Amino acid sequence: MQVAEKLSMNILEKLNGNIGEIALKLRCFIKDQVKGFKKKGVVIGVSGGIDSAVALTLCVQELGKENVYGLLLPEEESAPSSKTLGAEICENLGVSYEEVPISPILRSLNIYDQKEQIIKRTCPEYDPTIYKTSLVLPDFLNQGLLNVPYIRLVKDGKTVGKYRLKANDYLELIGLQGVKQRSRMLVQYMYAEKMNYAVCGTTNKTELVLGQFVKYGDGGVDLEPLADCYKVQIYALGKLLNVNEEIIKRPPSADTWSHYTTDEEFYWRMPIQIMDQILYAQEYQLPLQVIEKSTGLSRETIEKTQKHINRVRDTTEYVRATPPICYINK
Amino acid sequence: MEQIKNDIVDYLKANSFMDNNSSLKDNDSLTQNGIIDSIGLLELMDYICEKYSIEIPEDMLTPENFDSLQGITNMITKLAK
């Protein structure tokens, strides 16, 4: 990128540009990868969110609806809309799909009970018949607070309590929650191998850079067509591909807590448009003045946010890493 | 104050990625020097709360209060009063 081009750039416009070309590139990628793996089609976990909707639509456009299989993989704490929106998009695209609840797997491993025990020891007044729960981090842009996780108790849609998690409880909770995505991975491979299909992932670039996926969970797939597209580009792709407006408007979420917790509340800690512009600016080493103009943030806030993102990137290196191999003849 | 600093350094030597033989200046960054990561930070908070019998209010969970020996010591001194 030339210096003059960098200086006059509006980052969001840049991110939202060339979406048609990107869609074509992604379709070619899907076809090449599936062919390269000598597979007959793809299995996709359809969550009712924008990422899986875009991946599913691209796969159907490129491979044909008869070579794509959708899996709805709900569990006890999933929002009911996840299932209905997931089924709707499969039906609209004419894709065969099946619902395979993963709650029995989670119950057999005692995941819900263990999670409840952690919540109970963190939040003394917790009663599952009264409260819903979510895991949140404090807002970053306005408060600049550290990445300290809190359990939030919600009653009738209102937050009634917030408790800081102890380190060992947080680690245990992350392990328990990860079983949800890892169970989905098991089911997807069970179907993919039966059908001689590949498993298509739905992780986007924002999630990849921030380590916002579960290693060998939603990160355990055969191809990742969206992993070089920032989340705002996924929305632009969704619009281009005529994805259902309800899916586009739905706040993104991992959907693993009884109270629907958005990615902004737990991962990004700032609006996605800001996060993606800063990530893009880091990727292309854009000058601060361009970021200031594009985001409307002060220089100080941008620098603070960049530091925060670098910390997240560093601490999630392990999540992105493939198992290192010790090459004995080198 | 010196006692608090010594306690924190002892804790970090035993529980973080800090080398036993290395020294830590009052204003050295714990994160930038790779001494603690986000989980290490949560563990350090738990240690501080238990050791000094204090609760850290959310608005004090800032990088300034946790990223250096001096910041941590100032915060504990303020809360333990």
Image: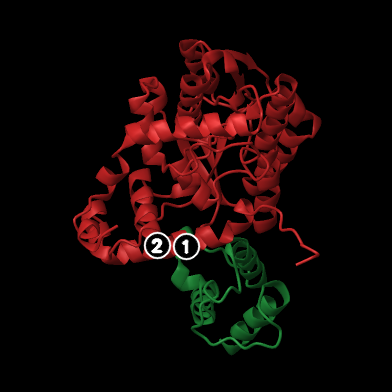
Chain colours: A red, B green
Figure check: A107 above or below A306: above
Name the quarter where the C terminus of chain A is drawn.
Answer: bottom right
Residue type marked 2: Gln
Mark 1 touches mark 2? (CB < 8 Å): yes
Q: Which sits in the foreground, B62 or B31?
A: B31
Quadrant of the rendered image containing residue A117: top right
- At x 48%, y 23%, the residue is A62
Give the image location of residue B3, x and y in percent.
62, 87
Q: Which sits in the foreground, A234 or A224?
A: A224
- At x 43%, y 50%, the residue is A269
Distance Cα–Cα, label 1 vs label 2: 6 Å
- At x 53%, y 39%, the residue is A203
**Secondary-structure class at tag 2:** helix
Residue position for label 2? A306
Quadrant of the rendered image containing residue A32: top right
Q: Which sits in the foreground, A285 or A182?
A: A285
Residue position for label 1? A310
How many marks can you see? Answer: 2
Quadrant of the rendered image containing residue A196: top right
Figure check: A305 above or below A137: below
